[in-house]
Image: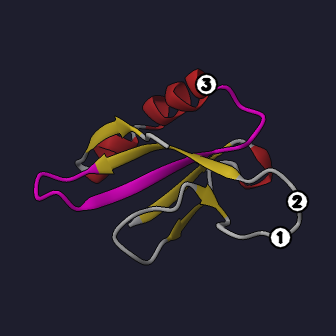
Amino acid sequence: MRALFIGGVVDNSEMDLDGNQPPVHYPENSGSGRPRYRLHQVGQRDDGSIAYAVYGAPDLADQEVERVADERGYARRFEAIPTIATH
């Protein structure tokens, strides 16, 4: 699955994530005490697999992350259905 980042120092960056479920925060265990990127949206394919996970910077509002993800067309690009991540 692909991790996509919105806001902060890694805005518009991507990376591959291992596993079947994306972590709620990225990085999972920073140990630095700094706020981490939080999972906002998951794109699921028709077969149930997760195509992508959208992470937002800690200072961004949920609505802004959703707006940018839609503007960047992640769902269309990965041919997946976007859903809001629940924590």
Identify the residue under disc 1: 31
- Looking at the rendering, the stretch of residues picked out in magenta corresponds to 44-61
x then y, percent, for residue 47: 11, 59
Query: Label 1: few (<14), some or many (≥20) within 10 Å?
Result: few
Q: Secondary structure at mark 1?
A: loop
**Residue 83 lies in quadrant:** top left
x then y, percent, for residue 5: 60, 51
| Residue 2 is covered by the magenta coloring | no
Identify the residue under disc 3: 64
Distance from disc 1 to disc 2, alpha carbons, whole Å, reads 6 Å
Of mark 3 and mark 2, the one earlier in the sequence is 2
**Looking at numbered disc 2 in the image, what kind of residue is underneath it?**
Gly
The reply to whether discs 1 and 2 touch (Cβ–Cβ < 8 Å) is yes
Q: Nearer the viewer, mark 3 or mark 2?
A: 2
Of mark 1 and mark 3, the one earlier in the sequence is 1
The relative height of residue 87 versus residue 21 in the rendered view (above or below) is above
**Looking at numbered disc 1 in the image, what kind of residue is underneath it?**
Gly
Task: Name the mark on residue 33.
Answer: 2
x then y, percent, for residue 75: 32, 42
The reply to whether discs 1 and 3 touch (Cβ–Cβ < 8 Å) is no
Distance from disc 3 to disc 2, alpha carbons, whole Å, reads 24 Å
Residue at the limit of the structure toward the bottom, as seen here = 18
The relative height of residue 27 versus residue 46 in the rendered view (above or below) is below
**Residue 73 lies in quadrant:** top left
Q: Quadrant of the N terminus?
A: bottom left
Distance from disc 1 to disc 3, alpha carbons, whole Å, reads 27 Å
Q: Residue at x 44, y 63 (%)?
A: 2
x then y, percent, for residue 4: 53, 54
Figure disc tally? 3
Q: Tell which of 87 and 39 is nearer to you.
A: 87
**Looking at numbered disc 3 in the image, what kind of residue is underneath it?**
Glu
Q: Residue at x 30, y 52 (%)?
A: 78
